[in-house]
Amino acid sequence: MKVQLVKIAHARSGDKGDTANVGLIALRDEIYPILVREVTSSRVKEHFKGISKGEVERFELPNLGALNFLLHESLGGGGTLSLMTDAQGKTFSTALLRMEIEVSEQEASTLELA
Amino acid sequence: MKQKIRIAAGQGFWGDLPEAPVRQVEGGPIDYLMLDYLAEVTMSIMQKQRSRDPSAGYAKDFVPLMKQVLPACVERNIRVTANAGGVNVAGCAAAVKDVALELGLHGKLRLGLVTGDDIMPALDELLDRGIELRNMDTGAPLATVRDRIQSANVYLGAAPMLEALNLGARVVITGRATDTGLTLAPLMHEFGWSPNDWNKVAAGTIAGHIIECGAQCSGGNCQFEWRSIPNLADVGFPIIEAAPDGTFVVTKHDRTGGWVTIPSVKEQLLYEMGDPREYITPDCIADFSTVRLEYEGRDRVRVFGIEGRPATDTFKVSISYTAGFKAVGTLVYSWPDAYDKAQAADRILRARLDRLGLKFDQMLTEFVGANATHGPLAGRPREDLPEVQLRVGVRAEDRKAVEQFAKQIAPLVLTGPPGVTGFAGGRPKVEEIVAYWPALIPKTEITPAVSIIEV
């Protein structure tokens, strides 16, 4: 079944030049392995198609139950050069939480997602 | 040696909640007040101010703030670390000295000044010697923008601040210095940590990272169960309670709003994060993959396990340069057909700009209320949107082109689609863009300077 990330994770995003970073944090420890399996850098690149022009890098932080994504060429030049409302990428966090991922029925029932 | 040091964050940026530092001093026991004033392009703003007025060029708010809190700081032995000096550390310190004298603190206060971050005077000589200061993002050599540079400052680390504290400074004022150093230096001073004790230096650095954005780790901008966060109107700014072994607790004063929870701390840990195993500062490389968190009570999160590695042999340089002009115009379209009307207005505007032969390096149209933040991810806007804000921005090297664009927004009210308002602010302001150029420089090229002023 499909689950939207906003149901199982929280996030914060920010900027470094023209790169947005999104930290995606599992709401519970048991959810983290599902994020690692489903929220790959290629899926995130596909999700942000039309927003991010560059590559997507992913870093794993099992100690925090979190993934960190770097979305390159995403902020219209970044900093003061950008014309975007969200030149600092602050809302990339919630944009990622829109993503739907696939979980098995068993995972859904163990995690009481249904 | 003290077994516990409390470092309170008072400002997360220049313009943060003005009463926060005062509340940190008055709300309970603290040993240090840490104030971060400098964002990436703040130095260029300060440079501009100083070119108009030689006594300006620092965070002006810092001076009246010191007037408010210095008596309590002296009485209760609280020290202050602040990168408020901007491009005029001496001017800032002189103004602080004046208010300290007004307060009758003569002989009771020592100010520590950290300078040496400004490499603007040495820039040509550095470039001549083959130090290219290539842009860390694009790889371009600095020579390509040499004639447009406004400021060039090295991010100094904890070392010179530590020296100032060791010399007895109660208030340490720096120019461009890292926000993490403002927290790390007090810990090194109090606990006698060696600069090569990488795990402890990394711990102090991560402590600094957690509190450098003020309340952003204590309930502000916290997505986790945001509706449940108590009393943000009275949000408590964060406090680090550090131990000599490099572990620390993130907390806040009792009877303040917000919360310090594992989710709120995790969100801030990930803020503006690159490779979490390589958080590079002048002081060390901190490894965020080693951070462990646990609850120690209400609004108390214990942080431990942090490991670090030796610092690199370069400093980061923050260079600002002028990069053309920009303007952003907005109008608000109301129901019915709000989104369609805003789109029609955008088409009309673009046709008129074309007819005028105007060329821009970049032009961006957004529809606030429909898809300005999440773009295509927001899906098709609802048919019955009550209103949409049309927001159009342009950027160009040619100031005149941007000025002509600015004159084309308000006319849409009488010459475009109906149901439009929100133009009371007048013509969009044309602003010169001061852009950011990050680069690296060998540490051997830089000599931080520390001086003391007795009040």
Image: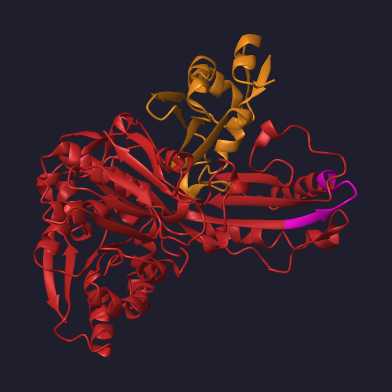
Q: Which residue is drawn at 51% across and 52% down?
A: B220
- The image shows residue B270, relative to residue A45, as above or below, that is below
Instruction: Point out the image quarter for the C terminus of chain B.
Output: bottom left
Quarter of the image holding residue B440? top left
Residue A32 percent location from the top left of the image: 49, 22
Q: Can residue B341 be seen in this view?
A: yes
* Image position of B190 (left or right of A37): left
Residue B453 percent location from the top left of the image: 14, 76
Rendered colour, chain A? orange
Chain depicted in red: B
* Image position of B371 (left or right of B163): right
Q: Which of A106 and B365 is in front in this view?
A: A106
The extreme front residue here reads B297
Quarter of the image holding residue B426? bottom right
- The image shows residue B39, relative to residue A74, as above or below, that is below
Q: Is residue B138 visible?
A: no
Query: Which colour style is shown?
Result: by chain
Is residue B36 located in the magenta-colored stretch of the structure? Answer: no
* Image position of B321 (left or right of B381): left
Q: Nearer the viewer, residue B416 or B283?
A: B283
Q: Residue at x 10, y 40 (%)?
A: B196
Residue B75 percent location from the top left of the image: 24, 77
Residue A9 percent location from the top left of the image: 56, 30
Q: Which of B427 and A19 is in front in this view?
A: A19
What residue range appears in magenta? B331-340
Instruction: Point out the image quarter for the N terminus of chain B.
Output: bottom left
